Image: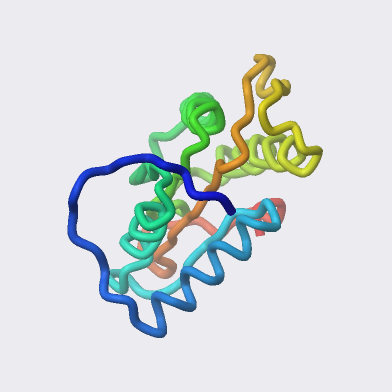
Amino acid sequence: MSYGYEYMGLASRLVITPLTDRCWMTITGALHLKFGCAPAGPAGTGKTESTKDLAKAMGIYCVVLNCSDQFTYSMMAKHFAGLVQAGAWTCLDEFNRIDIEVLSVIAQQLLQIRVALLEGKTGYTFKFQGDDIKLKGRFGVMITMNPGYAGRTELPDNLK
């Protein structure tokens, strides 16, 4: 993975522990294979913060989106289209709060992007949801989930 040269100002950083180091290695390994990543753990253990800090260390802009059951597939398509063109990452916090029907469509949207990444279309346009958009290869998706809470759904098989 290449450095992104995105300046995000002087801000505090996380302390590097064996756990954050393992988390970072897992995320970078998954992104190298053109997959997303889903750091797991109970609420408050630093899943989102570890993702944001890795993006900062790599000079890549990371948009954190706190998901809810009000999200639609068209909202997510616009979100992904913007991030793909910017070459940014997104951390979809509490991803399993989104309705199961919408999660299934999101999985198909992410598959379209992954296929374009695997085909090496970086710097070129590809069809996404009926529009031609330019792909930057640094795009990445991380999701966090807090299982066991009320109102949470199980991930569909095409997202696992």
Question: Residue placed farthest to the right in the image?
Answer: 119
Q: Report the residue at 59% width, 54% height from top.
A: 1
Residue 5 location (% of width, % of height) = 41, 42
Among the 4 quarters of the image, the one containing residue 154: bottom right
**In the image, is residue 20 above or below residue 92?**
below
Let me know if residue 144 appears in the view.
yes
Question: Residue placed farthest to the bottom in the image?
Answer: 18
Q: State the quadrant of the C terminus.
A: bottom right
The number of numbered badges drawn on the structure is 0
Q: Report the residue at 72% width, 23% height from top.
A: 126
Q: Report the residue at 38% width, 40% height from top.
A: 6
Among the 4 quarters of the image, the one containing residue 148: bottom left
Q: Which colour scheme is used?
A: rainbow
Among the 4 quarters of the image, the one containing residue 147: bottom left
Instruction: Say which of 16 and 35 sits in front.
Output: 16
Q: Report the residue at 67% width, 36% height from top.
A: 113
Instruction: Say which of 97 and 9 sits in front.
Output: 9
**In the image, is residue 39 above or below residue 67?**
below
10 with respect to 53 (left or right): left
Let me know if residue 151 appears in the view.
no
121 with respect to 101 (left or right): right
Residue 42 location (% of width, % of height) = 36, 74
Residue 118 location (% of width, % of height) = 77, 44
